[in-house]
Image (cartoon, grey):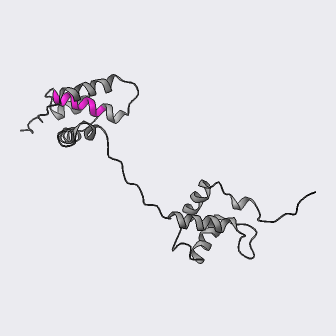
Amino acid sequence: MGRPPLKIVIAAKDQRLLLSLLKSGIQQVRVVLRALALLQLAEGVSAPQIAKTIPLTAQAIRRLGHRYQTAGLDGALYEKPRPGAAEVLDSSQKQRIIAMVCADPPEGRARWTVRLVAEEAVKRKLVPHVGRETVRVLLLHHDLKPWREKNVVRGRSQ
């Protein structure tokens, strides 16, 4: 004996929005599939039957129905933003590293390298720890390429 079909009542306004979403131009595939599944759930079709025609699992379709009931249409169709990784450096640390790179490289070095910037930032206690990739991305965002140029002061040509 299977589960009883999920009873979902979609408001007329929401049904119009779903139909207009399906008729409109370019949409994310996920949103379109969820809209189709919601419309079929409203017609009383069971989740396993919907899963045969729409490439979603029956469990995902049931969760979609429950999400519509609790969070409404936007909560069912669209995902919440994901937090992502926390930033490693705050703005003052970034500024200190950029200022360090704009100055002369350490004694005995002709130019800065990404590895040298990371090591010197930790050695000078600008940051507790920093990786090469973090430094590389920071320099890239500020359009700095210190490994390409020697920091040499040149006299004026007359």
Q: Is residue 38 magenta?
A: yes
Query: Vertical placement of 70 versus 109: above or below?
Result: above
Say whether residue 54 is visible.
no
Residue at image coords 22%, 32%: 38
> In the image, residue 42 lies at what x, y percent?
16, 29
Residue at image coords 59%, 77%: 123
> In the image, residue 93 lies at what x, y percent?
54, 67
Observer-nearest residue: 142 or 133? 142
Residue at image coords 56%, 64%: 94
The N terminus lies in quadrant: top left
Say whether residue 96 is visible.
yes
Q: Give the range drawn in magenta.
A: 33-42
The C terminus lies in quadrant: bottom right
Q: Does the magenta stretch include residue 72?
A: no
- Name which quarter of the figure residue 72 lies in: top left
Q: How many marks?
A: 0
> In the image, residue 89 lies at what x, y percent?
50, 65
- Name which quarter of the figure residue 133 lies in: bottom right
- Name which quarter of the figure residue 119 lies in: bottom right
Farthest residue toward the top? 23
Q: Is residue 42 left or right of residue 131?
A: left
For the stretch drawn in magenta, the main secondary structure is helix
Q: In this view, does 121 lie to the left or right of 35?
A: right
Q: Is residue 11 left or right of residue 33?
A: left
Farthest residue toward the left? 1
> In the image, residue 12 lies at what x, y percent?
19, 26
